[in-house]
Amino acid sequence: MDMQTYQDLMLAVDLSKDEKKLILEKRQKQCLCRQCPTYMECSGEEASVFCTIGKSNCITREIECLCPTCPFAAEFGLKNTFFCTRGSEKQQLLVETLQVRKTWVE
Ligand code: SF4
Ligand code: SF4
């Protein structure tokens, strides 16, 4: 994770509910999920910006992920993809860290 992403995550922890809502609305404008082949399975679903909100309640099949071409992902240096099925950037980073820790202990 680069410093900018880390700072953004730390800042997000301290934001108020309204501030978080504003950020989510801004990200929704940049989000490419609704044009993504994987999203089509649940095209009636309202949710997007899965990198921030976490897994979809509907999408189960991974076909293709447009996140690597998303301006938001580039701006914040997101490392992961398929947020709709695997969880938010934060969740995937956490799982990755826990798995690394587990191998240290074993
Ligand atoms: S990185 Fe993916 S989930 Fe996040 S805003 Fe971009 S397209 Fe949407
Ligand atoms: S997170 Fe990736 S795979 Fe899922 S809908 Fe968005 S662009 Fe498609």
Image: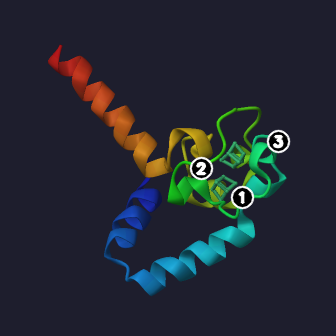
In the image, is 86 to the left or to the right of 90?
right
In the image, is 11 to the left or to the right of 51?
left
Q: Residue at x 64, y 76 (%)?
A: 26
Task: Give the labeled residue for mark 2.
Answer: 56
Secondary structure of residue under mark 1: loop
What's the residue type where badge 2 is placed? Ser
In the image, residue 45 above or below residue 60:
below
Measured Cα–Cα span from mark 1 to mark 2: 9 Å
**Residue 27 position by quadrant:** bottom right
Secondary structure of residue under mark 3: loop
Do the numbered discs 1 and 2 sit on residues whose CB atoms are within 8 Å? yes
Which color scheme does this rendered protein use? rainbow
Residue 101 picture location, percent across and down: 23, 28
Residue 37 circle label: 3
The verdict on label 3 being within 8 Å of ligand 2 is: yes
Do the numbered discs 3 and 1 sit on residues whose CB atoms are within 8 Å? no
In the image, is 12 to the left or to the right of 64?
left
Residue 45 circle label: 1
Do the numbered discs 2 and 3 sit on residues whose CB atoms are within 8 Å? no
Residue 47 picture location, percent across and down: 65, 62
